[in-house]
Amino acid sequence: MFDILMYLFENYIHSEADIFTEQNELTDELIRAGFNKPEIYKALDWLEQLADLQHSDKFPYLNGQPHHAIRIYTDSECQLLSVECRGFLMFIEQIGVINSITREMVIDRLFALDKPYIALEDLKWVVLMVLFNVPGSEQAYAQMEDLIFDEPTELLH
């Protein structure tokens, strides 16, 4: 399913192509690209649930949450997210790329991927997808793009 999400993000969202394609046309295109229907439907459902999080009461406790709250991860979250992933989430929250609400949205969408573990690169792409879908997050999206695409290729001393 994650491969389909990446395909959609790179070919429609990130490239600014026509995103208002009929679901049937999109499904047909994804089948032609080599993806199977059950995974396509899961990916489209994942995107729909991401859009629904904008209007959800799923995180009502976040409305009054302090800006400097510490996130305590559950055992299942620790199994899914390595120390490196959790550290990256903390880092991007501290520098203002995400806030407590978008962090929780990212964690929600990571669990919805139904993977046994999340690689750091996968996490970065999910953060980018979430930020793309959150109104008013254009600056944060640009910062996240810089973090993904402008990584140094050599060791810095």
Image: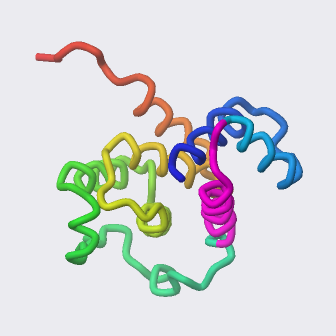
* Residue drawn at point x = 24 percent, y = 77 percent: 74
On the question of residue 96 being in view, the answer is yes
* Residue drawn at point x = 36 percent, y = 55 percent: 93
Q: Name the colouring of the figure.
A: rainbow
* Residue 42 drawn in magenta: yes
Nearer to me, 73 or 100? 73
Nearer to me, 22 or 146? 22
Spot occupied by residue 9 in the image (x, y as percentages of width and height): 63, 41
Nearer to me, 35 or 11? 35
The answer to whether residue 17 is left or right of residue 119 is: right
Q: Is residue 6 above or below residue 46?
A: above
* Residue drawn at point x = 63 percent, y = 69 percent: 49
Image quadrant in which you'd find residue 135:
bottom right
Nearer to me, 135 or 35? 35
Check the picture and name the quadrant holding the C terminus.
top left
The answer to whether residue 78 is left or right of residue 16 is: left
The answer to whether residue 16 is left or right of residue 21 is: left
Q: Is residue 122 above or below residue 111?
A: above
* Residue 120 drawn in magenta: no
Q: Is residue 58 above or below residue 32?
A: below
On the question of residue 100 being in view, the answer is no
Label tally: 0
Q: Main secondary structure of the magenta part?
A: helix
Spot occupied by residue 20 in the image (x, y as percentages of width and height): 86, 47
Spot occupied by residue 2 in the image (x, y as percentages of width and height): 51, 49
* Residue drawn at point x = 55 percent, y = 36 percent: 142
Spot occupied by residue 102 in the image (x, y as percentages of width and height): 49, 62
Outermost residue toward the top? 154
The magenta stretch spans which residues? 34-52
Q: Is residue 144 above or below residue 55?
A: above
Image quadrant in which you'd find residue 39:
bottom right
